[in-house]
Image (spheres, rainbow, N blue to C red):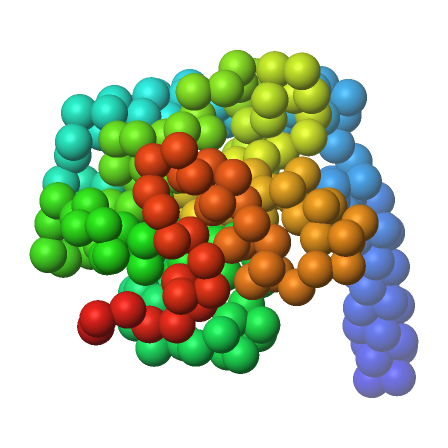
Amino acid sequence: MHILKDKILVALAVTLMLLLSACAGTPDKAASDSPLQNTPQDAQAKDAQYQERIQDKQVLLENMFKNFLDGIRNGASAEVLYSYLTDSSEYWLDTLELHARRYDAEALDSCQFYEAYSIILYRLYEREHLWQTDDDRMLFMLLSKSGMLDRFLKLDLGPMKVKNDRGSIGLAKSPDVPIMLFVWDDQTWKLDLPATLPLITKGIESIAVKKNWTNRKLALYWIEKEYHMTYSRLDDSLLEPIGF
C-alpha cells in the first residue's frame, strides 16, 4: 500500500514539474502584445496613419475656410454663418450684443479691447442706421460683407496649419504667427471667434500700452481713425447706450 502511494506521489510530482516547465517555456501573450514589443514597422505604420489624418483635416479646413469666406461675401444667412462658428462663439456674440445695449462708459473699462471696439462700433451702426437685419446684429456687424472680419481677411494670408484638433492661419509675411484659430468639432472645423479677434487686434492694442490708455479710449480712437471721413460725432457719446 505504501509502495502504491509512493508511486502515485512520484507520478504527481513529475506531472507538476512538466506543467511548470511548459508554463515557463510558453511566451506570455500579454507580454508579446505589449507596446514595448512593437516593431519599427509598427511605429512607421502608426505615423503614416497619423500624417494621413492630418492631411485629411488640412483639406477639410481649407474647404471650410473657403466656404466661410464665400458665405460672408455672398451674404449668407445668420444660420449659415453660425454653422461655421463654435457654440461658445455664438454665446459670446449674444452676450456682447447685450452689453452693447446696456454697458455705460465705466462698464466698458471691464472689457477687453476687441470687446470695447465691437460695442462702440455696434452703437455707431445703430446711430447711423447701418443695419440690414433686425436679428443677429453683432454677427452681421462682424461677419457680413465689409464687416470687421471681412475687411481684415482682404489682407494676404499664409497657409493653413493643422495640429491634432486645432487649426490656424497667419499672415503671409508671418505664417507661423496665428491670427485665426479653428477647432475640430466631431467631423468638421469651426472658427473660434472670441479666441481669434484678440489675435487680429493685438497689434492695435500695443498703442494703448505705449500711451497708457484704457481699452475704451483706444477703441474710440481707432473707430475715429477708421471712420472720421464718413461719420461725425465719433466722440464720448458712443461710450453710452444709444436709443435702445
| Rendering quarter of residue 103 | bottom left
Between 9 and 158, the residue placed more toward the observer is 158
Between 154 and 47, the residue placed more toward the observer is 154
Q: Is residue 234 above or below residue 119?
A: above
Left or right: residue 37 versus residue 123 is right
Q: Is residue 215 above or below residue 140?
A: below
Looking at the image, which residue is at 41% across and 39% down?
227
> x and y percent of residue 152 in the render?
46, 29
Q: How many marks?
A: 0
Q: Is residue 146 above or below residue 94?
A: above
Quadrant of the drawing holding the N terminus? bottom right
Furthest-bottom residue in this view: 1
Left or right: residue 219 versus residue 230 is right
> x and y percent of residue 104 in the render?
43, 77
Looking at the image, which residue is at 33% across and 21% down?
66
Left or right: residue 197 versus residue 88 is right
Between 226 and 182, the residue placed more toward the observer is 226
> x and y percent of residue 135 in the render?
14, 57
> x and y percent of residue 109 in the render?
58, 72
